[in-house]
Image (tube, grey):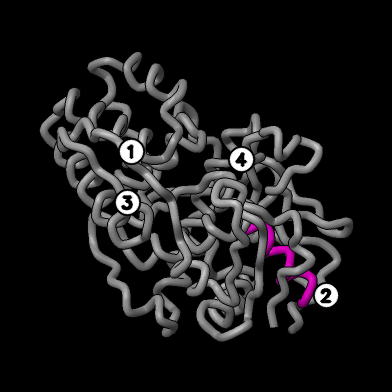
Amino acid sequence: MHVSNQTQIIKTELNIIFKNEYIKTPYVKEFVNWLDLRLDSPDSFNHTYFLLKTKQPWQCNNLYDAFENYRWPYSFVCPVQGKRVSGAGFGETFEYLNLLALSFRNSLERNDTAGVINSALAMLTWGGVLNKNRERLLNMGDGICGYFRSVRESLTSSSCCLGGHDGVIMNSGFTKLYFLLIDDFIMYDGRVGAALGLLGRLYAEEAGLKELPEEIEFSFGSGRTSAFRQKSGNRRNPGSTTYKLPSFNGNPTRQLNDNIKASWLLKELADKTDSRFSLLPQASPLNERMTAIQSALFMIGYDVSMSAQSRGR
């Protein structure tokens, strides 16, 4: 694979660029094609790690395999439905998130402050990111509907561009709320960022690039530390000696713009592919095909510290 010399259009200062410009960039087009070959071809992307919570190894041989091995256990009383909800696999998870998206959007249209807050709290609880975000939501008070309407207008794909997006709150909790609210907007947390960073790095290695193009450079977030894993052994850093990748920790603008880039890129991939992912619908409120690809990335990005074992064809 060879990509000719070209001017990188996304600079560190985040020049204004829209979706149609981004997806036509040669590096982005090459990367989408590279990813498409690794969606469901056997042994096209082998990745493995040890899942600490279950004390078992996890592995995949392509992205569809990673999607089929998706697992995120949850069990709590949902403030929207008023009953206990539980699950772990993709099917029941997507059904639940789709209900939350409908509740969130309908509450917003009715200017129902309580409904918006309850939907948001349910999503944050599901994602395990309620801490601190709960206070931020409650402090918005009656202005919460106006805030989310403004964010929806700013981040909707047809009108969105890369840039500062002043006033938009961004962290691993609020990306989940924007996922519920905005069509074709993915959840971009530390795990998804780590997986995209790894895949971009592998593409650059195979293409023989001297550096990772900024168009496909994605930031990662540090995983939670514990007695099993200290900061010095960050399992989320997908970089190598040759290709350094940034962390979005302490840089919400970076995380938000990478979230926008990733959403554009995954939508282009979802539209293009004829892999098994293409059997999943792209309907509203949530795009199941994009969510499935995102879920594959979520599982891959749990641990990329052994990324030398991750090789594409």
Give the mark nearer the N terminus: 1 vs 2.
1
Q: Which mark is residue 87?
A: 3
Q: Position of residue 188 (x, y in %)?
A: 50, 48
- The residues tagged by marks 3 and 1 sit, at their Cα atoms, a distance apart of 14 Å
Whether 188 is among the magenta residues is no
- The residues tagged by marks 1 and 4 sit, at their Cα atoms, a distance apart of 23 Å
The amino acid on which the numbered mark 1 sits, given as a three-letter code, is: Met
- The residues tagged by marks 3 and 4 sit, at their Cα atoms, a distance apart of 32 Å
Number of the front mark, 3 or 4: 3
Q: Name the residue under label 2.
A: 208
Q: What element carries label 2?
A: loop
User: What residue do we see at 24% from left, 64% from top?
Assistant: 283
Residue span colored magenta: 196-206
Residue closer to the observer: 26 or 110: 110
Q: How crowded is mark 3: few (under 14 residues within 10 Å), some or many (20 or more)?
A: some
Q: Name the residue under label 4.
A: 254
Q: How crowded is mark 4: few (under 14 residues within 10 Å), some or many (20 or more)?
A: many
User: What residue do we see at 53% from left, 41% from top?
Assistant: 256
View extreme (front): residue: 55
Left or right of residue 286: residue 212:
right
Left or right of residue 161: residue 122:
left
Is residue 9 in view from this perspective?
A: no
User: How many numbered markers are drawn?
Assistant: 4
- Quadrant in the rendering for residue 149: top left
Q: Mark 1 points at which residue?
A: 123
The amino acid on which the numbered mark 4 sits, given as a three-letter code, is: Arg
View extreme (right): residue: 241
Number of the front mark, 1 or 4: 1
